[in-house]
Image (cartoon, rainbow, N blue to C red):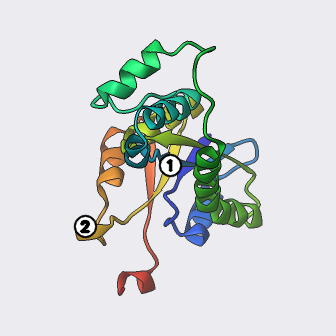
Amino acid sequence: MNILVATDGSLSSKRAAEAVGRYYREGDVVFVFTAVNLPTDVLRELGDSGVKAASQIALEAGQTLGAGDRAAERLIKSMSTKTRPPVDSPILAGLAETANARMRPIMKALDGAGVKAGSFWRTTDNRTAKTVLTAMKDCETDLLVIGSHGRGKYEGQLGSTGSKLVRAAPASVLVIRRPQEDLSR
């Protein structure tokens, strides 16, 4: 069985590891995954070079910027491999650190539970559910593990990304509830 644990950094590591441990069998493949939003608003303020940098990051992640970002789409199509600007390494390093910080606690908890897991991340352009669904397809996922809560006005309910994943996932979805003590906040 292929299991994908998708996190935005708020998924309870302990609860996720316990749940995955119940399903995990020797030979199963487990990946921890997170999608990190491209800082397109900041990059756009930098002008054309910012859009090119965002386009390059998305392109290297095998994605494009949002379809609504016509300028970025034109730039991606017009850039050949030889003329693309180099990715600003501080931006890429920041994205990688964000991703690793989100995944690190769950990786540690899974290891402690005897579950061997790999990890990976991808950039997204505020289309997190679509990015997770693509990761599921790429990993041939049989079971998706996600957190149960939304943020903002939907706090305490299944968030919009979680709702989309439950409806659209091509595999079973295991929703991990927040610990009871966290609900009183």
Q: Is residue 69 above or below residue 97?
A: above
Residue beneath disc 2: 154
State how many labels appear.
2
Q: Nearer the viewer, residue 78 or 21?
A: 78
* Secondary structure of the residue carrying numbered label 2: helix
Q: Are marks 1 and 2 in contact (CB under 8 Å)?
A: no
Q: Is residue 73 above or below residue 184?
A: above
Q: Which residue is at a point 58% across and 50% down the rendered structure image?
A: 95
* Secondary structure of the residue carrying numbered label 1: strand
Image quarter of the C terminus? bottom left
Q: Which residue is at a point 59% across and 16% down the rendered structure image?
A: 83
Residue beneath disc 1: 36
Crowd around label 1: few <14 · some 14–19 · many ≥20 (10 Å): many
x, y (%) of residue 90? 63, 48
Q: Is residue 31 left or right of residue 166?
A: right
Crowd around label 2: few <14 · some 14–19 · many ≥20 (10 Å): few
